Amino acid sequence: MKFKILFVVLLTAGAVYYIYPLKEKINLGLDLQGGIHMVLQVEMKDAMTAELDNSKSNMESVLKDEKIDVTQVKAYPEKLEIMVSGVPADKVKKAEKVFDDYMSRFNVSDDGDGAYTLSLKSVAMKEIRKQAMRQALITIHNRVDAYGVSEPIIQRQGLESNRIVVELPGLDDPTRVKKSLSEPGWLEWRLLAAPNSFKSKADVLAAGNGKLPEGTALFPSEPRGKAGTVVWYLVKDRVELNGNDIKTARRSSDQFGSPNVAFTLNQAGVTKFSRVTTEHRGERLAIILDKKVVSAPSINEPINTPNAQITGHFTIDESEDLAIKLRSGALPAKMIFLEERTVGPSLGRDSIRKGVRAAAMGLIIVMIFMLFYYKVAGINADLALTLNMLYLLGGIAYFHATLTLPGIAGFILTIGMAVDANVLIFERIKEELRNGKTPKSAISAGFSKALSAVLDGNITTLIAALFLFQYGTGPVKGFAVTLSLGIIASLFTAIYVSRWFFDLRLELTPNVKKLSI
């Protein structure tokens, strides 16, 4: 008996410790605290194109390192193919070995005359989609964490869907967050194919008789000045460095106090940067962020250090957001916003007030009923019910679960389910008393014989709650968490705590002849 008393007291003290003060220890969901709810879709076509471009760039580097001079390496995103032409006859076997060693995700077909077509395998496409979703979830998590959001919900909507649900409690300005999450954060360094910028697209096309020169691409600059002037840069197809070569980034400022972004390259990035600045001294290197040229500085001398800066016409927020994107990594593809809504904190406070009122009224009515129907034994049930609510709140705080509006509904449902177990046990005790057993024997038989019915009812509900938690999203998950913790607390208080109250009473009055039940 002493052990039981100590256990219940320690458990109760622990629950009080974890929930005090209540406002600070219980994490509120979006519908109670207010915030931003968004549903985003990952454009898988962009992920495929990015993989194609990356594979093309890597293959060009390997072919160059192996001294295999080809006429052209060109990517065709619409077909998910890479065409290699002009492989010298004496280098065919060496080129085919490069394809086998470095292009395992592609089927290789020999088109004759030193030409090859590399097409993306279906298995590789499936893996790219899987990787794209995983990378998108990780990147969004990293970017959201930088804003200091408490208990954000970021998860895939469905098992095979390319949609992501994002809920950010406590944020009420969606514009900046939306901009941060929608921009992929693709960062590339490419050499300029023309030494100077162009005023318009038409000027570029006019210089090339209506077409872009082979092996080049055209990108606009960031809008400049109050008029938002945009110029165009003709750059080479080959990507010299990208965001994957960056180790870390932070907001900084130049010698004039203007915001910029300072970054550190990893070892691979330092090697690439050193090579390109050594081989192309005197040329210009364009820094391209999300398909826009941020700046295009001249290469004056070889750069062998890992530290560098990105300068541009940034505000403080823009430089901070850019640093966040570079630290978190690039999104694998463009994100399309399918749904967006903002929940005001006043609506959340109103929901909490009404939910607490409903829970309190339900608790009071149930406790009065138990006292009226089961008399003194009803006090036992009411004490167990009170501890049940305390343990439930303690469990939510301990596991850092998020309390949502459906979670409050689960909290109220737990009140009914908690006394349901007591009702089964008490009715069984009354039956045993009617059969002429002593109070002690009736209590023992009542708990043992009602145990299977209590477990069956609660465990089946717990299984349903676990499935809701596994496959539900947002508020549904909040309901499942509260319901699951409530069922576990109910089983403990109905079977262990309630029995302890009866045993305590029998120990205090060992010669009791009648139970008030």
Image (cartoon, rainbow, N blue to C red):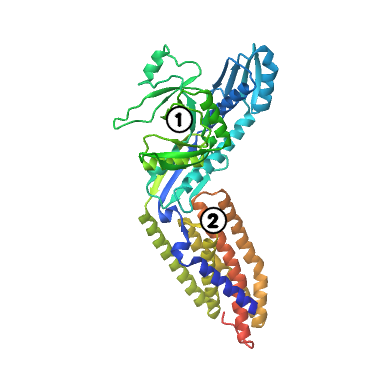
Lateral position of residue 302 relative to residue 352, left or right: right
Q: Which quarter of the rendered picture does the N terminus lie within?
A: bottom right
Picture coordinates of residue 396, whole percent (x, y):
52, 61
Picture coordinates of residue 74, whole percent (x, y):
55, 19
Q: Which of the 4 image quarters holds residue 259? A: top left
Q: Marks 2 and 1, how far apart in space?
A: 46 Å
Q: Give the structural element (helix, strand or loop) at label 1.
A: strand
Q: Which residue is at the far bottom?
A: 511
Examine the rendering and report whether any part of residue 153 can be seen: yes
Q: Which residue is mark 1?
A: 288
Q: Amino acid at mark 2?
A: Ala
Examine the rendering and report whether any part of residue 415 can be seen: no
Q: Residue 238 has which mark?
A: none
- At x 43% / y 61%, what residue is drawn? 355
- At x 43% / y 19%, what residue is drawn? 194
Picture coordinates of residue 112, whole percent (x, y):
65, 12
Lateral position of residue 451 relative to residue 80, left or right: right
Q: Give the structural element (helix, strand or loop) at label 2.
A: helix
Between 234 and 44, the one nearer to me in the picture: 234
Between 429 and 19, the one nearer to me in the picture: 19
Q: Which residue is mark 2?
A: 480
- At x 51% / y 64%, what residue is drawn? 393
Q: Which residue is at the far front?
A: 301
